[in-house]
Image (tube, grey):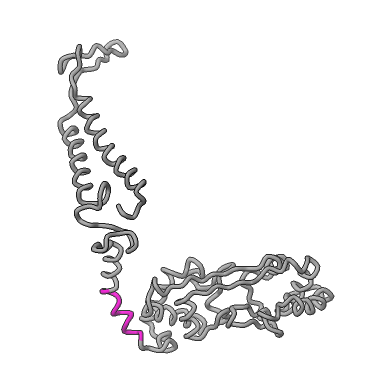
């Protein structure tokens, strides 16, 4: 119960005990004989449709004992598990910050059980270089299962990505596609920021958008593109994307010349990106997966673009 504030602890205790007491009172109240009540087996005097009568018969004994059984079960449950106190068994799903120091949570027990069983399987690949591991059929199968569990929600089951989530199969990398860079991305995560440029005005945004479109061979207004080339420099775009617009993997800035688009390549989408900026986050998996699983997962991701 320690994972809640004192108020919510009290609230849960009052509801739990109150429900038990109420249920016990209810069954005793309904069994109480009242003055003027018909004898057991006699009609009560209530008649419907001329001949449909109500008899004063008690509840079936099996139903009554089943009701008592649920109350007894509830008392035993509250004695063993958290409900009105921490419980005699010391069970909890809480993390370390919200439980007694001598208690190991069910989550931790299950994680340890899994690590004891599967940890050695991943550990045997730890010393194999990622380029070699990427060629191992069994390891690749394990890496794919990890990918489908933790990564497909963003990058898709085929790893071809979605709007705002990179394609991992095309050898076009924002943060680099070397084994070390892939491992670093999975381990520590990434935070990408494209600053908003609404301050330069709609005209210049339109011009630089046309210039960016020409870099990857898209149809654009030549006059606007020529003016946009100057805006690309004066607005500071070269600081991240470089004078040649090929990007910088140290910063995670995109290559604007390869016709690979993270958010879309239409004029409207490009203008929106320049105007409002973009923010991308790749969550860190260091604590979730550990080094051995990350090593196998990185080998699978590496294999997708080779």
Q: Residue furthest front?
A: 6
Count of numbered badges drawn on the protein: 0
Magenta region: 116-126
Q: Residue furthest right?
A: 223
Quick check: 278 left or right of 220? Answer: left
Residue 270 position in % (x across, y down): 70, 69
Q: Is residue 66 above or below residue 232?
A: above
Residue 121: say if magenta.
yes
Which picture quadrant has residue 162? bottom right
The reply to whether residue 145 is visible in this rendering is no
Residue 52 image-quadrant placement: top left
Q: Nearer the viewer, residue 78 or 116?
A: 78
Residue name at image x 41 percent, y 78 percent: 294
Residue 297 magenta-highlighted = no
- Most common SS among magenta residues: helix
Horizontally, residue 49 falls left or right of residue 178, namely left
Q: Position of residue 128 (x, y in %)?
A: 37, 88
Q: Position of residue 164 (x, y in %)?
A: 58, 68
Can I make out residue 143 in this image? yes
Residue at 63% from the left image edge and 78% from the top image edge: 254
Quick check: 238 above or below 39? below
Residue 172: image location, x then y, percent: 58, 80
Which quadrant of the structure image shows residue 289? bottom left
Name the foreground residue: 105 vs 13: 13
Which residue is pictured at 30% across the width and 79% down the height?
121
- In the figure, 43 relative to 30: above or below? above
């Amino acid at each position: 119960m320690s994972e809640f504030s004192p108020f919510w602890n009290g609230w849960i205790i009052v509801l739990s005990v109150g429900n038990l007491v109420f249920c016990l009172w209810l069954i005793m109240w309904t069994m109480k004989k009242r003055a003027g009540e018909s004898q057991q087996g006699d009609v009560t005097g209530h008649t419907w449709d001329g001949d449909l009568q109500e008899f004063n018969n008690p509840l079936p004994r099996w139903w009554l004992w089943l009701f008592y059984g649920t109350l007894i079960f509830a008392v035993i449950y509250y004695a063993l598990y958290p409900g009105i106190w921490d419980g005699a068994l010391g069970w909890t799903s809480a993390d370390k910050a919200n439980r007694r120091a001598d208690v190991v949570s069910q989550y931790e027990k299950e994680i340890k059980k899994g690590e004891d069983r599967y940890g050695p399987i991943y550990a045997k690949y730890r010393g194999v270089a990622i380029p070699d591991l990427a060629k191992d059929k069994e390891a690749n199968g394990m890496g794919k299962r990890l990918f489908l569990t933790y990564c497909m929600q963003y990058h898709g089951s085929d790893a071809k990505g979605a709007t705002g989530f990179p394609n991992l199969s095309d050898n076009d990398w924002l943060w680099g596609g070397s084994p070390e860079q892939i491992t670093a991305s999975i381990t520590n995560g990434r935070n990408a920021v494209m600053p908003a440029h609404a301050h330069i005005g709609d005209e210049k945004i339109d011009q630089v958008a046309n210039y960016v479109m020409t870099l990857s061979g898209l149809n654009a207004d030549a006059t606007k593109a020529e003016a946009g080339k100057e805006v690309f420099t004066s607005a500071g775009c070269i600081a991240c994307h470089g004078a040649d617009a090929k990007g910088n993997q140290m910063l995670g800035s995109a290559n604007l010349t390869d016709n690979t688009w993270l958010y879309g390549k239409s004029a409207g989408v490009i203008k929106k990106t320049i105007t409002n900026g973009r923010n991308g986050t790749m969550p860190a998996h260091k604590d979730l997966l550990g080094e051995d699983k990350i090593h196998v997962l990185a080998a699978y991701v590496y294999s997708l673009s080779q």
